[in-house]
C-alpha cells in the first residue's frame, strides 16, 4: 500500500463520529436479532470502532516488520469484527476494553507470522503455543500462574526448555511490554509467568547476555569439547561434574575426558588472547 492510500484511509476514519453509550447498547441488542437491521447494526459498530484499531496498531507496529502498516491495521480489524460478534452488553464491562483484547491478540498473531523478523525455529513456535495453552488451562483450574516445573510436566518438556522458550519470546522485538498475553483468554501474561517463577526481568535479561557471551566464547570448540567444558564447570543448565561422571555421560574413557578438557582450555585461552 502507498502512503497516499494510508492518508486516505486515515481521513475516512477521522470523519467517523463516536456513538453515545445508549446508542451503542441499542445497536448491540439489535445484533442479537436476525434480519437486515442486525447486519446494519453490526457494520455500524465495526465502523465507529475503527479508530480504536488504529490507536492500538500504532502501539504495536514498528517499521522492521515485514508487513505494511495498512495490512497490519486490517489484522486488527479482524479482531474488532470478532469482538463485535462476541460482546455481551449486559455483562457490564465497556466494549472498548473488550475489543482491545481481541484487536491486540490479532496484532500479536500477525507479528508471530512475520518470519523475517522473528528468528524462532518452527519447533520453538509450536512449543510456545503449547505453553500458552497449558498456562491458561492451569491458571483457570488452580487460580495461580503455573511455575516452570508444572508447565514442563504437563507438556513433556524439560524445565530449561520451558524457560528458554519463554525467554526467546520475551527477546522478540515485538514484545514491547511484558503484558503480552500468553493465552487466548487474555488471562496470563508473559510477565505473570516469569515473575511467578522467582525471576525478575533484569535477572532474565542478564542471563540472556551472559549466555550469549558464553556461547560466542565456546564457538571455537567442537561439539564434544563444548559438552565436556559445560559438564566440568557447570555452565548453562549443567552442574559441576567429575571426570568420571563426564566419561559416563559422553560414553568415553576418563583419560579421554581429561584430554578433551586440556584441549578445550588451550583453545579458549588462545581465543581470549
Image: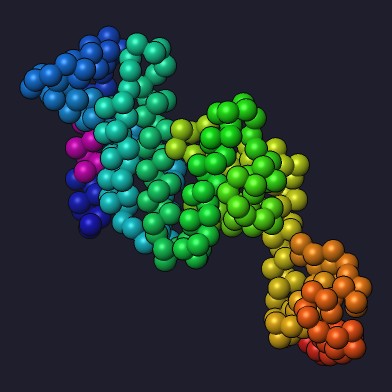
User: At which x and y percent is residue 79?
Assistant: 32, 37
The chief SS type of the magenta part is helix
Picture residue at 76% right of the left edge, 65% below the top: 236
Q: Nearer the viewer, residue 243 or 174?
A: 243
Q: Is residue 174 above or below residue 140?
A: below
Image quarter where the N terminus lies is: bottom left
Q: Which residues are magenta?
A: 9-15
Q: Nearer the viewer, residue 40 or 248?
A: 248
User: At which x and y percent is residue 242?
Assistant: 92, 73
User: At which x and y percent is residue 26?
Assistant: 22, 11
Quarter occupied by residue 214:
bottom right
**In-image side of 177 versus 267 (left or right):** left
Extreme-left residue of the structure: 36
**In-image side of 68 versus 226 (left or right):** left
Q: Verify whether residue 174 appears in magenta.
A: no
**In-image side of 132 versus 197 (left or right):** left
Picture residue at 40% right of the left edge, 32% below the top: 100
Kindly tell me whether residue 129 is visible in this rendering.
yes
Image quarter where the C terminus lies is: bottom right
Q: Nearer the viewer, residue 240 or 43?
A: 240
Count of marks overlaid on the render: 0
Quarter occupied by residue 217:
bottom right
Picture residue at 41% right of the left edge, 63% below the top: 115
Quarter occupied by residue 272:
bottom right
Kindly tell me whether residue 180 is visible in this rendering.
no
**In-image side of 87 versus 108 (left or right):** left
User: At which x and y percent is residue 207?
Assistant: 74, 58
Picture residue at 39% right of the left edge, 59% below the top: 114
Look at the image and name its color scheme: rainbow
Q: Is residue 87 above or below residue 81?
A: above
Amino acid at each position: 500500500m502507498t502512503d497516499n492510500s494510508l492518508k486516505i484511509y486515515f481521513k475516512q476514519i477521522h470523519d467517523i463520529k463516536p456513538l453515545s453509550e445508549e446508542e451503542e447498547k441499542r445497536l448491540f441488542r439489535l445484533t442479537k436479532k436476525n434480519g437486515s437491521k442486525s447486519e446494519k447494526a453490526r457494520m455500524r459498530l465495526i465502523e465507529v470502532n475503527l479508530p480504536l484499531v488504529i490507536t492500538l496498531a500504532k502501539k504495536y507496529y514498528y517499521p522492521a516488520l515485514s508487513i505494511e502498516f495498512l495490512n497490519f491495521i486490517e489484522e486488527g480489524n479482524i479482531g474488532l469484527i470478532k469482538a463485535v460478534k462476541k460482546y455481551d452488553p449486559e455483562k457490564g464491562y465497556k466494549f472498548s476494553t473488550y475489543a482491545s483484547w481481541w484487536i491486540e491478540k490479532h496484532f500479536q498473531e500477525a507479528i508471530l507470522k512475520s518470519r523475517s523478523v522473528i528468528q524462532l525455529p518452527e519447533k520453538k513456535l509450536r512449543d510456545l503455543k503449547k505453553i500458552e495453552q497449558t498456562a491458561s488451562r492451569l491458571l483457570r483450574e488452580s487460580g495461580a500462574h503455573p511455575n516452570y516445573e508444572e508447565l514442563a510436566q504437563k507438556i513433556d518438556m524439560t524445565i530449561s526448555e520451558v524457560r528458554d522458550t519463554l525467554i526467546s519470546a520475551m527477546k522478540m522485538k515485538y514484545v514491547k511490554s511484558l503484558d503480552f498475553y500468553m493465552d487466548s483468554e487474555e488471562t496470563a501474561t508473559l510477565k505473570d509467568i516469569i515473575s511467578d517463577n522467582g525471576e525478575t526481568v533484569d535477572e532474565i535479561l542478564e542471563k540472556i547476555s551472559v549466555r550469549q557471551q558464553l556461547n560466542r566464547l565456546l564457538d571455537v570448540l567442537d561439539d564434544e569439547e563444548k559438552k565436556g567444558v559445560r559438564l566440568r564447570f557447570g555452565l548453562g543448565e549443567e552442574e559441576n561434574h567429575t571426570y568420571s561422571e563426564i566419561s559416563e555421560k559422553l560414553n568415553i574413557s576418563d583419560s579421554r575426558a581429561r584430554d578433551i578438557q586440556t584441549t578445550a582450555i588451550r583453545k579458549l585461552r588462545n581465543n581470549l588472547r
